[in-house]
Amino acid sequence: MKYAFYPGCAVHSSSKEYGDSAKAACKVLDVDLVEVPDWNCCGAIDAVSSYKPQYSLALAARNLALAEKMQTDVVTLCSACYFTLARTNKLFKENAEAKAKITEALASVGLSYSGNVKVRHLLEVLLSDVGLEKIKAKVKVPLNSFNVASYYGCLLVRPLDLTNFDDPEHPTRMDELVETLGASKVEYYSKTRCCGASLGVTDEKVMLELSKRILLDAKNAGANCVITACPLCQFNLDAKQKDIESKFALKIGLPILHFTQLMGLAFGIDAKELGLNRNVVSPNRILPQVAEIRAK
């Protein structure tokens, strides 16, 4: 299975381990991610969209036009990119004014778009196109000691008219993946609450408070790790966890993994290849079982 892969800015910078682990897991599953050539920023959902919405549409549409040439679905790892590209695609198809502006902007750089691209998140591709049965068949290291809190965030499952992937209020598909990998799912209230997203730039104290609630909720429910499907969510919960502990005089110490890293561990892929050494909160405390099984 081959897909046009749109990595987005974070996966090429602060979250390289997400891209590395995704490619490693996809290789095991015979999923070919072919990077969209000369891709650009998706247009962001705050910085650009709020200030110059037409610029955001043009940036996202350029990526869609480039992906359309590849004649396959475009797949991304970032929930924000997923939302931005899918929203632009929907507006192009349903809003005549937006379509006209997009067409004009693309023509100015020698591109055109027909609206034939389907925008998808890699998690949905793996669950829908590959399927849990094939994923389970590739598991070499059942993660029996892992109690995993799946964090969906805001944009992976909402709004429903863009994503149509899972229940927007009570999603379960990432939890099903967790159980397929041999781990135990952790039910907790905050799995779709906002982590603060880019407020970490404009109003960090709000972001720290929102992320704190998610982390404490997951930990109090019995999780020994959290998985995410968005690089910004992972960054807030992982890289900012020490700041949260300092600000609120707490000890959390909860490893935050990209869902592809969890898959890679279950597939027997080396932790370094999965970029686990780049995670800020060390996952070493939950890895002994993986090492023991691989040594047998």
Image: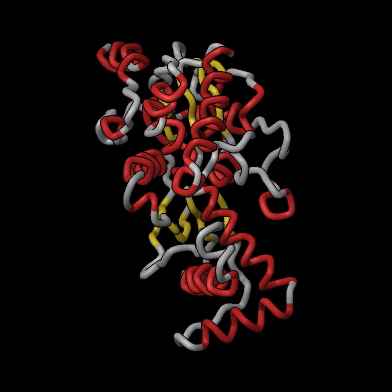
Residue 141 x %, y %: 39, 20
Q: Is residue 51 above or below residue 166?
A: below
State the residue at coordinates (57%, 59%): 84
Taking the image as shown, residue 96 lies to the left or right of residue 239, namely right
Along the line of sight, the residue nearer the viewer: 100 or 49? 49
**Image coloring type:** secondary structure
Q: Residue at x 33, y 17 (%)?
A: 287
Residue situated in front as seen by the camera: 26 or 61: 61
**Corner quadrant of residue 184:** top right
Q: Please report the residue visible at 46 percent of the width from the left and 15 percent of the height from the top.
A: 224
Q: Is residue 10 above or below residue 278?
A: below
Horizontal relation, residue 257 to residue 121: left or right = left
Q: Quadrant of residue 169?
A: top right
**Whole-percent x, y for residue 207 in the image:** 51, 37
Residue at (46%, 43%) from the top-left corner? 200
Tell me the quarter of the picture where residue 236 sits. top left
Quadrant the C terminus occupies: top left
- Measured along the vertical axis of the image, is residue 223 above or below residue 206? above
Query: How many dots with numbers?
Result: 0
x and y percentages locating residue 266 in the rendered image? 41, 25
**Residue 209 horizontal side relative to residue 187, left or right:** left
Residue 96: x and y in percent read: 73, 79
Task: Decide which of 266, 231 is in the foreground and name it.
Answer: 231
- Residue nearer the viewer, 194 or 159: 194
